[in-house]
Image (cartoon, rainbow, N blue to C red):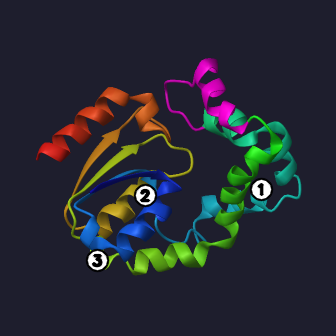
C-alpha cells in the first residue's frame, strides 16, 4: 500500500510501516515528524504551554484545537468559518474532545517513543517517499522537512510556499496533482 500521513498520523502510521515494511510500497508525508523534539527551542516553548493546568479545560470546554489552534496554523489562505465548523463538528461534546487532549498530552509524554521511531526507520527509509510540505507551518517548520529528507534516501519533495500546516486543505489541487504524479511515477 501507499501510506499517506499528516501531523500525528506520521508517528502513528510510520510506527505501523516500520513494523510491517513488507506492506508498504510508498510513503507520502505531509507536515509531520518522527523524532523527539525535546531539544527544539519551539517545542520547549510549546511544552510550557502544554503543561498549563488549564489545557484540559481549554480542550474539553472550548474545543481549543479546531476552533483556535487550527485557524492559526494556516498559511496565506485563511481558514473559512465554514471549514472551522466542519472540523469542529466531530468534537461536539466535551467527551468527544478527549482524543485531541490525548494528542496534546502525548506531545509531552511520548518524546522517547518518537525518537525510537526515528532510530528504527531503516526498514522504510529507502521506500519511495513524497514529502509535501507547507512552508508556513508555525509548528512543523522547514527544518523538520530537512531532517525528514536526510533520513529517507529515495525521496522527492513538493514545498508549498504559501501553505501552513494543512497543505491538503490550503492547496488541494497541488497536493492531489503531486500525489497522482508520484503514484504514476
Q: Is residue 126 magenta?
A: no
Residue in view at x 31 percent, y 27 percent: 173
The quadrant holding residue 74 is top right
* First of labels 2, 3 by sequence position: 3
The quadrant holding residue 105 is bottom right
For the residues labelled 1 and 3, the Cα–Cα distance comes to: 35 Å
The residue carrying mark 2 is 143
Does 112 appear above or below 9? below
Residue in view at x 19 percent, y 45 percent: 182
Q: Are marks 2 and 1 in contact (CB under 8 Å)?
A: no
* First of labels 1, 3 by sequence position: 1
Does 156 appear above or below 179? below
Please provide the residue range marked out in magenta: 73-91
Q: Are marks 2 and 3 in contact (CB under 8 Å)?
A: no
Q: Is residue 83 magenta?
A: yes
Q: Is residue 3 left or right of residue 75?
A: left
The residue carrying mark 3 is 123
Residue in view at x 39 percent, y 80 percent: 120
The residue carrying mark 1 is 49
For the residues labelled 2 and 1, the Cα–Cα distance comes to: 22 Å
Label 3's element? helix
Q: Position of residue 88 (x, y in %)?
A: 68, 32
Q: Position of residue 6 (x, y in %)?
A: 45, 50
* First of labels 2, 1 by sequence position: 1
The 10 Å Cα crowd at callout 3, few under 14, some 14 to 19, many 20 or more, is few
Q: Quadrant of the N terminus?
A: bottom left
- Residue toward you, 24 or 127: 24
Amino acid at each position: 500500500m501507499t501510506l499517506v500521513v499528516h501531523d500525528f498520523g506520521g508517528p502513528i502510521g510510520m510506527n505501523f510501516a516500520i513494523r510491517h515494511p513488507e506492506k508498504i510500497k510508498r510513503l507520502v508525508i505531509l507536515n509531520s515528524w518522527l523524532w523527539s523534539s525535546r531539544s527544539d527551542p519551539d517545542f520547549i516553548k510549546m511544552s510550557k504551554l502544554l503543561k498549563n493546568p488549564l489545557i484540559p479545560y481549554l480542550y474539553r470546554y472550548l474545543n481549543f484545537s479546531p476552533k483556535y489552534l487550527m485557524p492559526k496554523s494556516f498559511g496565506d489562505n485563511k481558514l473559512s468559518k465554514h471549514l472551522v465548523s466542519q472540523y469542529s463538528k466531530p468534537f461536539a461534546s466535551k467527551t468527544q474532545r478527549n482524543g485531541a487532549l490525548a494528542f496534546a498530552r502525548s506531545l509531552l509524554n511520548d518524546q522517547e517513543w518518537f525518537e525510537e521511531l526515528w532510530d528504527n526507520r531503516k526498514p522504510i527509509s529507502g521506500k519511495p517517499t513524497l514529502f509535501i510540505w507547507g512552508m508556513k507551518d508555525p509548528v512543523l517548520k522547514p527544518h523538520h522537512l530537512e531532517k525528514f529528507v536526510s533520513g529517507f534516501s529515495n525521496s522527492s519533495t513538493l514545498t508549498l510556499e504559501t501553505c501552513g500546516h494543512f497543505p491538503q486543505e490550503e492547496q488541494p489541487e497541488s497536493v492531489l496533482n503531486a500525489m497522482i504524479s508520484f503514484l504514476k511515477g
